[in-house]
Image (spheres, rainbow, N blue to C red):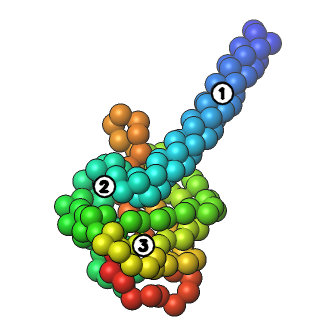
């Protein structure tokens, strides 16, 4: 009797461990897919900025999103972000280059990226290009949506060099 109890216990333990390792493996694969999806969304974010597609750009934000630009109060909610950024899209040709994604992580339904970027604007009415952020960094927090997509919940960014006075 003891031998069959030990065998049964061994089989149960082995099965439980196999299920645990399988779950961890699947979770890691899902995390990698999520990181890939976030990086692709960040790429599309850049495309939207650089093509002046404001509707696409604003669609990447949650309704409660918070944008924290340098030298200005936080913009809380999509309506405030829209109000602040629409004139910039309307009046300027924007050029953002995310030169590297230094880190990307996913924790359940939250993801984050730490990026290095440059940002310049050119007035559509004519004028010289202004390099607003020649060397910047951004920390962005994303929330997974019910459809599985990712949207920006918080975006904090600033420059590594002295700021040029321009409102964005």
Residue 77 vs residue 43, the one in the foreground: 43
Which x, y percent locates residue 76? 25, 67
The numbered dot on residue 22 is: 1
Q: In which quadrant of the rendered view does residue 98 lie?
A: bottom right
Q: Which image quadrant: the C terminus? A: bottom left
Could you tell whether 136 is left or right of 122 in the image? Answer: right
Q: Residues within 10 Å of mark 3 (few under 14, many from 20)?
A: many
- Dot placed on the residue nearer the N-terminal end, 2 or 3: 2
Q: Are marks 2 and 3 in contact (CB under 8 Å)?
A: no
Q: Are marks 2 and 1 in contact (CB under 8 Å)?
A: no
Q: Residues within 10 Å of mark 1 (few under 14, many from 20)?
A: few
Q: Are marks 3 and 1 in contact (CB under 8 Å)?
A: no
**Residue lying at 28% horizontally and 69% vertically, measured from the top left:** 91
- Residue under numbered circle 2: 54
Q: In which quadrant of the rendered view does residue 160 lie?
A: bottom right
Could you tell whether 45 is left or right of 91 in the image? Answer: right
- Residue under numbered circle 3: 121
Residue 115 seen: no
Label 1 element class: helix
Q: Residue furthest front?
A: 126
The residues bearing labels 2 and 1 have C-alpha atoms spaced at a distance of 43 Å
Between tags 2 and 3, which lies in front? 3
Residue 157 vs residue 93, the one in the foreground: 93
Between tags 2 and 1, which lies in front? 2
Which x, y percent locates residue 138? 50, 69
**Residue lying at 44% horizontally and 88% vertically, measured from the top left:** 164
- Dot placed on the residue nearer the N-terminal end, 2 or 1: 1
Q: Which image quadrant: the N terminus? A: top right
**Residue lying at 51% horizontally and 50% vertically, measured from the top left:** 43
The residues bearing labels 3 and 1 have C-alpha atoms spaced at a distance of 49 Å
């Amino acid at each position: 009797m003891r031998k069959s109890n030990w065998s049964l216990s061994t089989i149960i333990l082995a099965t439980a461990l196999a299920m645990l390792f399988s779950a961890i493996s699947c979770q890691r694969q899902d995390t990698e897919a999520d990181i890939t999806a976030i990086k692709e969304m960040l790429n599309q974010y850049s495309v939207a900025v650089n093509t002046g597609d404001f509707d696409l750009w604003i669609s990447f934000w949650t309704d409660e999103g918070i944008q924290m630009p340098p030298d200005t109060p936080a913009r809380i909610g999509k309506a405030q972000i829209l109000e602040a950024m629409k004139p910039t899209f309307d009046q300027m040709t924007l050029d953002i280059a995310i030169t590297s994604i230094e880190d990307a992580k996913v924790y359940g339904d939250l993801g984050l990226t730490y990026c290095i970027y440059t940002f310049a604007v050119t007035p559509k009415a004519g004028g010289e290009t202004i390099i607003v952020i020649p060397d910047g960094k951004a920390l962005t927090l994303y929330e997974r949506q019910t459809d599985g997509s990712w949207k920006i919940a918080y975006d904090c960014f600033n420059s590594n060099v002295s700021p040029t006075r321009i409102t964005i």
